[in-house]
Amino acid sequence: MRIAMISEHASPLAALGGVDAGGQNTHVAELAIALAAEGHDVRVYTRRDSADQPVLVPMQDGVTVAHVPAGPAEPLPKDELLPYMKDFSRWLVDQWRDDWVPSVAHAHFWMSGLAAVTAGRQTGVPVVQTYHALGTVKKRHQGAADTSPPRRIGYERALGRAVDKVVAQCQDEVRELVRMGVPRTRMALIPSGVDSERFTPEGPAEPRDPDRPRILTVGRFVERKGYADLIRALKIVPGAECVVVGGPPGANIETDAFASSLRRLAESTKVADRVRLVGAVPAQEMPRWYRSADILAAAPWYEPFGLTPLEAMACGVPVVASSVGGLADTVVDGLTGDLVAPRDPRLLGMALRRVLGDPVRRFAYATAALDRARQCYSWKRAAEQLSAVYATVSGLRSPTGAVA
């Protein structure tokens, strides 16, 4: 089966750690590889953001990345890409009619959905939608700071009725979509996965002070990831260091504005000597960082799914996380880690101190976390479940009715 994956802003080839390069990039890349391993011919369509990018780039056997000429060939914030989705869809139509005709299109993020549905209606290609994040949730938590296009929520609601199937990643997302008016019967619940061959407890680890407990946190440098709450929580966890992996490359971390704000907070709360900002690291080095940690802290205000806790769990590392979004599914409270209310440094600090201070509990969490990651969250399992969805929708006619 030919699978077109539409990921307008999140290229599977992008370096991770930037403001708009994180979990979705990893999800698209790993899923494409897993689908190819199932025998599918996968082509990932992402926006060209550099003039020297070839139209087609082989990623590995069975996976090709297509760079779509939509908008200027330069990096742009994803919230500025909506005006270029018509050009994106026109290019898809031309390609799907004359070149490579997919059996199904799988859109990742709402703007990708707009382009995919528009192209699908003109070519008869059915569309599956994964949102990765919902505007209703972002608006609820960010309020006036939300930079999403004004019509985002309306578009997302319309997409839920227009596509052939919606793939939700966690129970919280299912509930949110139902509240938006998307019928539950149109959804399939298929979570992200983790590469358990790369993320393992065995292997080299980053050097550390064996006498100082290490709390690791990983993610993009955006406020909602809760880094400030974690730094404030350190006051309740005496002796532990907090290592932050993410943001700009390490060479640029000293001049990064967000990193500077975290350093000022650490100084004002008198924990600066226990906070280390590493910056972004190559993806292949991430298992070393997870293995070096006693515990992974994930303290976002909200999180559509959250891949880093799964990666840590696959490395046999227990997790203390906010009880939000997909984290409430992946982390089993009291079994693989602890869940706490978001935006509460005191509760976060107490949970971290409790786990770090109890070696027996930490070992039990680590063992259960490893087992859960391997048994429930493989990319192979996700690819198999999605293959069944694709087979179901591939015989359907493309839906009708205006999205906008």
Image (cartoon, rainbow, N blue to C red):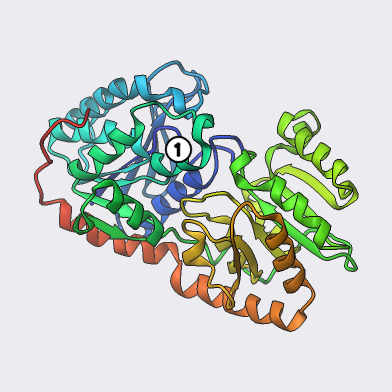
Let me know if residue 288 appears in the view: no
Residue at image point 47% right, 18% down:
73
Query: Does 344 sit left or right of 2 as displayed?
Result: right
* Element marked by disc 1: helix
Instruction: From this view, report whether residue 203 is shown above or below residue 402.
Output: below
The number of callouts visible is 1
**Front position in the image: 355 or 88:** 355
Quarter of image, res 237? bottom right
Instruction: From this view, report whether residue 75 is shown above or below residue 209.
Output: above
Let me know if residue 90 appears in the view: yes
Instruction: From this view, report whether residue 9 is shown above or below residue 326.
Output: above
Instruction: From this view, report whether residue 316 is shown above or below residue 242.
Output: below
- Residue at the disc numbered 1: 139
Residue 162 image point, x, y percent:
18, 41
Residue 94 image point, x, y percent:
22, 25
Residue at image point 51% right, 19% down:
74
**Front position in the image: 321 or 342:** 342
* Residue type for callout 1: Lys
Locate the C terminus and report the quarter of the image it occupies: top left
Query: Does 36 sit left or right of 370 as displayed?
Result: left
Query: Does 297 sit left or right of 34 as displayed?
Result: right
